[in-house]
Image: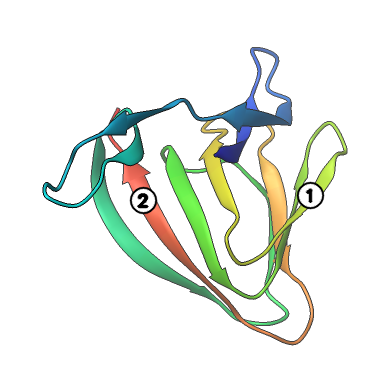
Amino acid sequence: MKYVRLYSDESGDSHFEDVEVEMSLVDISPPAPPLDVSAPIPSTNTVFLHTPAGWYGEPHPVAGRIFLIYLTGEMEATVSDGEVRRFGPGSVVLVEDTSGKGHSSRTLGNDDVLAVMVQLAD
């Protein structure tokens, strides 16, 4: 499994990075067969996030580290180094540019975006 990491470096610029998640075969629900499972990631809250069509967020850092898991619609994010990426249903993004120049984001097309936002523990 892979996800995209959006982070800020020591000079305050934001960037994207592709991350491969290491998984191990674990017998988590016997008698069901074992499943591939990642290491746990501590979190504090999980909320659903609705972004209406036409929404645009000026460049901003996030208040705290979050995972965004996109369910519907398509979102575009631009980091301060100029790279632009699009995220649609099934995309997973770790957003942790909590300082610096941040990123801008906007919904694409005529559809709203629905996502799951997992707030991570510090």
Q: Measured from the top left, where is residue 89 in percent x and y?
A: 61, 67
* Quarter of the rendering containing residue 36: top left
- For label 2, the residue is 118
Q: Nearer the viewer, residue 42 or 100?
A: 42
Give the amino acid at mark 1: Arg
Q: Nearer the viewer, residue 4 or 57?
A: 4
Q: Secondary structure at mark 2?
A: strand
Spot the residue most to the top.
Answer: 10
**Numbered label tally:** 2
Q: Is residue 28 left or right of residue 100?
A: left
| Residue drawn where x is 68% and y is 82% of the image | 53
| Residue drawn where x is 68% and y is 74% of the image | 55
| Residue drawn where x is 34% and y is 46% of the image | 119
Residue 41 in view (yes/no): no
| Residue drawn where x is 64% and y is 12% of the image | 10
Residue 55 in view (yes/no): yes
Q: Is residue 82 left or right of residue 90?
A: right
Give the amino acid at mark 2: Val
Question: Disc 2 or 1, which lies upstream in sequence?
Answer: 1
Q: Is residue 16 left or right of residue 112?
A: right
* Rendered position, 74 above or below 63: below
Q: Which mark is residue 85?
A: 1
Q: What is the quadrant of the N terminus in the image? A: top right
* Quarter of the rendering containing residue 13: top right
Q: Is residue 101 left or right of residue 20?
A: right
Q: Nearer the viewer, residue 40 or 86?
A: 40
Q: Which mark is residue 45?
A: none
Q: Measured from the top left, where is residue 92 in percent x and y?
A: 55, 50
